[in-house]
Structures are given as C-alpha cells and as structure tokens.
Image (cartoon, rainbow, N blue to C red):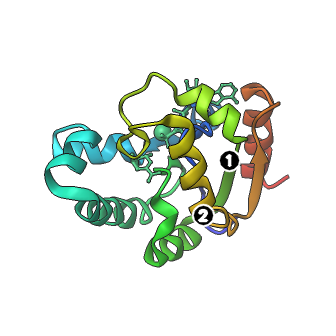
Amino acid sequence: MNKNNIILIGFMGTGKTTLGRRVAERLGWAFVDMDERIEEKEERGIPSIFESQGEDYFRRVETAVLAELAEGTNQVISTGGGCVLREENRRLMAAAGTIVALKASPRTIVDRVRGDANRPLLQGDLEQRVAGLLEQRKEAYDFADLTLMTDERSLEEMVEELAALAAGK
Ligand SMILES: Nc1ncnc2c1ncn2[C@@H]1O[C@H](COP(=O)(O)OP(=O)(O)OP(=O)(O)O)[C@@H](O)[C@H]1O
Ligand SMILES: O=C(O)C1=C[C@@H](O)[C@@H](O)[C@H](O)C1
Ligand SMILES: [Mg+2]
C-alpha cells in the first residue's frame, strides 16, 4: 500500500459509509465520509446543495474535499457514489491509497436505499433511476485495486478482508 489510506468507491447503497466506519474502527484509523464532510463544510444537506447550486457546484466542492483528504494518512475514506466520475478525482484517489470498489445488484441497491430521501439523483421512480444510472456508470468503478461483491456478504467478513489488506497480508 503506497499511503495508509483505504478509499471506498461504489454506487449509492453499496455500503461505503457503513463498511467504511466499521473498517476504520477495526484498524484504529480515522473515518471520513466525504458526503458528510461536504455537508459540514457547506452547512446544509446534499439535497439542498443540489437544489440551490446544482450538481456542478457539488462536484467542485467534492474535488476540493478529496484533495484535502489525499494529503492525510491512516484514514478510511468513503467517497460519494459519483466521486469517480471526474478524472482529477481518480488521480487523487490513486495517489492517496488503495482503492476498493463495492458492488451490489440493482435489486439489492433498490432495497437498501428505499425510503431515504437524502439522495437527490434517485428522486422519482427508484427502480428506473437506479437502472439508468447503473447503465451510465457501468464501468465507472472498474479502476479499483480490489472489488467486493456485497450482496451475499456480511459486514464482519468484509471488515476482516479489508483489515488484512491494510496490514499488507
Ligand atoms: N453488506 C451489507 N449487508 C446488508 N446491508 C447493508 C450492507 N452494506 C450496507 N447495507 C445497508 O444499506 C444501506 C445503504 O448503505 P450505505 O449508506 O452505507 O451506502 P453508501 O454506499 O454509503 O451510499 P451513498 O453513496 O448514497 O452514500 C444502509 O441502510 C446499510 O445499513
Ligand atoms: O452517485 C452520486 O452521484 C451521488 C452519491 C451520493 O453519495 C452523494 O455524493 C450525491 O447524492 C451524489
Ligand atoms: Mg454513503
């Protein structure tokens, strides 16, 4: 591992926040959720940022936050689902540590995010929105160093796998 950071990427609902928090606890590393960091910095929720200033603005803040985090070490960083879309972000992540992609089937994603209004890109018909975005992003997460299919896997099992990765095993 070049720098001691694990960077989790993946579509909405694949479990980046949930798993990231657990892995950080296990390793005694800092946990940073980029969506939460952006909300703190902007002092409002993601839906409000999208509504009042648009997605491009959100993406600029996202890159600024990632650039700051990339300077640090011993962190588990959970990125937002669209953080991989910018080339600049992919470069920052590659320089910052080991990139782990989380994947899940469309069915699992829909089940996991249903009822959560905090994802502006999933407003409307949920099944259609997930299917459409997954199609647009079908190769977007493929630059990771490691990919975990999360449908059938317990959090405990994945925590241990990532802890071993961090220990260089
Ligand atoms: N491996 C798993 N098994 C079962 N449920 C899971 C698993 N991973 C995550 N979940 C559940 O799925 C939901 C979404 O997970 P989470 O918020 O961690 O996704 P995310 O990738 O951070 O999404 P976003 O990109 O929108 O922030 C949560 O309710 C979480 O408890
Ligand atoms: O997939 C996306 O583009 C997004 C995912 C979320 O994590 C947030 O970063 C935001 O809702 C955008
Ligand atoms: Mg999250």
Query: In the figure, is residue 119 to the left or right of 22?
Result: left
Name the disc covering residue 97, or none: 2
Q: Position of residue 49 (x, y in %)?
A: 21, 47
Query: In the figure, is residue 74 to the left or right of 67?
Result: right
Q: Is mark 2 within 8 Å of ligand 1?
A: no
Q: Residues within 10 Å of mark 2 (few under 14, many from 20)?
A: many
Q: Nearer the viewer, mark 2 or mark 1?
A: 1
Disc 2 residue type (three-letter)? Gly
Name the disc covering residue 102, or none: 1
- Image marks 2 and 1: residues in contact by CB distance under 8 Å: no
Q: Is residue 70 above or below residue 75?
A: below
Name the disc covering residue 57, or none: none
Residue sitting at x 61%, y 65%: 140
Residue sitting at x 20%, y 41%: 48
Q: Position of residue 28 (x, y in %)?
A: 58, 36
What SS does tag 1 mark?
strand
Q: Nearer the viewer, residue 79 or 52?
A: 52
**Rendered image quadrant of residue 119:** top left
Q: Residues within 10 Å of mark 1 (few under 14, many from 20)?
A: many
Residue sitting at x 29%, y 48%: 38
Residue at mark 2 to residue at mark 1: CA–CA distance: 16 Å
Can see residue 7? no
Disc 1 residue type (three-letter)? Leu
Q: Is mark 1 within 8 Å of ligand 1?
A: yes
